[in-house]
Amino acid sequence: MDSSRMQFGLFLTNGVSDGIDDAAALQLSLDSAQLAESLGYEHLWVAEHHFMDASVCSSALTLAGYLLGLTQRIRVGTAVVLAPLVHPITLAEHVAILDQVSGGRLDLGLGRGAYALDYDVLSVPTERWSAGIEAILPAVIDALSKTDVTSEHALVPYESVTVRPRPRTQPHPPVYVATGTPEAVEVAARLRLPLQFYFYADTESRVETIQQYRGFAQDHGWDGEIGHLHVIPCLVEDDEASARERMSAGMTDWLTSGNHRTLNDPDMDLAVRAAQFRQFAPQVIAQSPIGPPRLVADWLEDFSAVTGARNYALHMEPLGEPQAIFESIRRFAANVMPRLKERSGVPQRPSAPQPV
């Protein structure tokens, strides 16, 4: 991706809530995807979780594959595939198929997740989680970009194999890395892979990680200028106070519904963690671009100036109101996107809105 171009997409989480069951949650993603493509958004990003109401999409690649078949132009990415739960060769094979049949429109986002339940139920050793995404990344990249690859890693050993089909995109489809650990940031910078920043990361921590990434990149002989993905809660509505209140309530429900024991802090009392979520969600919403078009555009311009961000995935689903979400998708495309792209020097492509 050209890191100088400002691009916008949607972050699709498929969460259930009052009035939205599993079927409706998935349908919201399908309708949002078609609407976004018709309005000129550049990409979609699909979340992956297990055993929680926060997201009923248990396979980001499966839903991404369907969305790629449902659309013609828009890119579709995973945010993220929980990479330690899948053998890197299996992951590379699935990615290569989707890259081929979609004409190269798949973006692969990889992370390791946090929940012990996933590893327990799926009988995956937690050592894969402890080893971090930095243990998986090189194996996946090698399998996609090379033939006759061999792994001697103790967690995922395999003999010399060649993944088929070979991917259409060379040397490999775009890969994004969701991480905050210095070890994984270093590997991402060494491999020249952009990062994914989730909605819960504040501006200061993003800037610090980007600076860290640039430092590692310079150690490896390049400047580190690349199009990191920034997931941002966003809603375009004229009544800012109402929009923030409803988004805050929706995000609180979304977070607390996924209150499982984590691998990084297995002894934490879940009641304490739920209380933290109830405090955290309003804080996230308070510092997000939510309100009338001018407020949203001003916020994103300021954020871009501070972070250098050009690649956004807008998280509107916590609202939990499909028609209001569709209207926000439309209004962002009509009233926010043109201003931001004009100021970043990107020509506008006309598009005709389609009703949902």
Image (cartoon, helix red, strand yellow):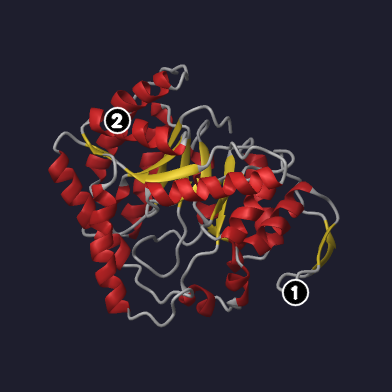
Q: Which amino acid, mark 1?
A: Ala
Observer-nearest of 20 and 185? 185
Q: Which amino acid, mark 2?
A: Asp
Q: Return the x and y of residue 134 as percentages of the image width and height.
A: 64, 61
Instruction: Describe residue 14's horizontal placement relative to residue 4 as left or right.
Output: left
- Of tags 1 and 2, the one toward the viewer is 2
At x 41%, y 83%, the residue is 267
N-terminal of the two: label 1 or label 2?
1
Q: Which mark is residue 154?
A: 1
At x 76%, y 46%, the residue is 166
At x 28%, y 76%, the residue is 272
Task: Please tell me whether mark 1 sits on a helix, a strand or a loop.
Answer: loop
Task: Please tell me whether mark 2 sits on a helix, a strand or a loop.
Answer: helix
| Relative to 190, residue 297 above or below | above
Q: Which mark is residue 298?
A: 2
Instruction: Describe residue 292's horizontal placement relative to residue 67 as left or right.
Output: left
Observer-nearest of 188 and 89? 188
Q: Which image quarter holds the N terminus?
A: top right
Q: Return the x and y of residue 283 as percentages of the image width and height.
A: 25, 55
Q: Return the x and y of residue 122 as percentages of the image width and height.
A: 55, 75
Task: Check disc 1: other Cα within 10 Å, few if <14, some if 14-19, many if 20+.
Answer: few
Instruction: Describe residue 276's horizontal placement relative to residue 245 as left or right.
Output: right
Q: Which image quarter holds the C terminus?
A: top left
At x 71%, y 60%, the residue is 89
Q: Is residue 356 visible?
A: no
